[in-house]
Image (cartoon, rainbow, N blue to C red):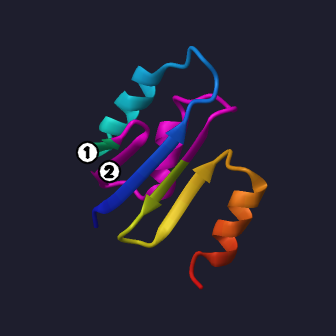
Amino acid sequence: MLSNLIISYDLNVAGQNYDAVIRSIKSLGDWAHIQSSIWYVNSQLNAEQAAKHVWANMDGNDSLIIVDSVKNEAHWYNLTNEVSNCIQTNWNR
């Protein structure tokens, strides 16, 4: 089953390799660039698999969230504890 992924990221330090991050996003499947750091991708990968793929091209101080609207799941890296807790508490309410 294909996933409809919404990808949002922040590269938090000047001099980041935006090209590598963008290439990794585009390699996931058919894509649309919605806003500067928000993408839609129709992919064979689920949110966790896609997040691991994109995160491999990011630094530990960056942040990333990928939401799969088909499977109603999300996977993220380096969001604040407050944000992570809010998502986990309220996701399937």
In the foreground, 6 or 34 = 34
Residue at 59% from the left image edge and 85% from the top image edge = 93
Circle 2 SS class: strand
Residue 15 against residue 59 in the figure, above or below: above
The residue beneath circle 1 is 31
In the foreground, 78 or 27 = 78
Residue 71 against residue 24 in the figure, above or below: below
The boundaries of the magenta stretch are 35-64
Residue 73 against residue 16 in the figure, above or below: below
Circle 1 SS class: strand
Residue at 69% from the left image edge and 60% from the top image edge = 84
Residue at 63% from the left image edge and 34% from the top image edge = 62
Which amino acid type is shown beneath numbered disc 1? Trp
Q: Which mark is residue 40?
A: 2
Which amino acid type is shown beneath numbered disc 2? Tyr
Q: Residue pushed farthest top?
A: 15
Residue 59 against residue 44 in the figure, above or below: above
Percent x, y for residue 54? 48, 38
